[in-house]
Image (spheres, grey):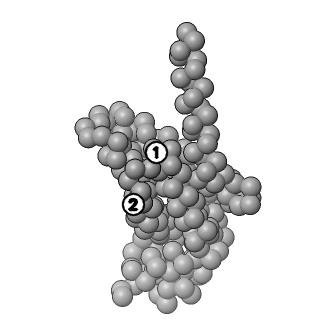
Amino acid sequence: MGHRDALLEGAKQCLTEKGYARTTARDIVAASGANLASIGYHYGSKEALLNEALIQANAEWGEALEKSMVYDADATAAPHEQFEAIWTKVIELFSGHRRLWAANFEAFTQIEHSPEIREALASGLQEARFGMGESLLARLAEGHDERAVRAVGSFFQALLTGVMAQWLIDPESAPTGQDLSYALLAITAGLREKEMSE
């Protein structure tokens, strides 16, 4: 492994062990076995390296997320049961990646001061929206337009970030897959009732 790759792996390790804000250049050097000057040579700055590490770590987590969003159980289950099963698996993923998500929330606090972080997170967000939207809509029917894919992906991204924040703060009382399914049924039933009464 060359210095560039070693630095990236070291930065990913530091993100999960120390978090985004508390990781120093010396921490990355110690974790990677590279030298301090190689950070500037390969990445320009510690921040650029951490941003790249965060993007790559999120992409790796995204692959695990994509697998968890595949419903591979009873094909005759009702849509809300499939929704519950998927979200139960997604929430289970949080426990194995708690520190990564804490690092993401730390990075969120830097976006007002760092256009580089904003750009990096925005790029990943766009990709996640369309990936989730396409994945979820593909199970319902073929041929959805771009607006539907983006809207569904945005909804799931909002749900994911919100549930994740609640889980980081208090895992014991954070919503479960069953809670989310129940909420979705209650909302859609309420909307149907309102439409019928108008």
Q: Looking at the image, which is closer to me, 145 or 81?
A: 81
| Residue 117 placement, left or right of 74 | right
Question: Mark 2 or 1 closer to N-term?
Answer: 2
Q: Secondary structure at mark 2?
A: loop
| Residue 43 placement, left or right of 109 | left
Q: Which residue is mark 1?
A: 78
Extreme residue toward the top, this view? 198
Residue at x-position 63% and y-position 54%:
176
> Is the C terminus in the top left, top right, bottom left or bottom right quadrant?
top right
Give, as a three-letter code, the residue at label 1: Ala
Q: Looking at the image, which is closer to me, 101 or 91?
A: 91
Q: Secondary structure at mark 1?
A: loop
> Is the N terminus in the top left, top right, bottom left or bottom right quadrant?
bottom left
Q: Which residue is mark 2?
A: 72
Q: Looking at the image, which is closer to me, 156 or 70?
A: 70
Q: Looking at the image, which is closer to me, 105 or 157?
A: 157
Q: Is residue 59 above or below residue 32?
A: above
* Mark 1 burial class by Cα count in 10 Å: few <14, some 14-19, many 20+: few
Q: Can residue 111 be seen?
A: no
Q: How many marks?
A: 2
- Kindly report the distance in space between the C-alpha atoms of the residues bearing marks 2 and 1: 13 Å
Residue at x-position 53% and y-position 23%:
192
For residue 67, which numbered disc appears in the image? none
Residue at x-position 38% and y-position 53%:
75
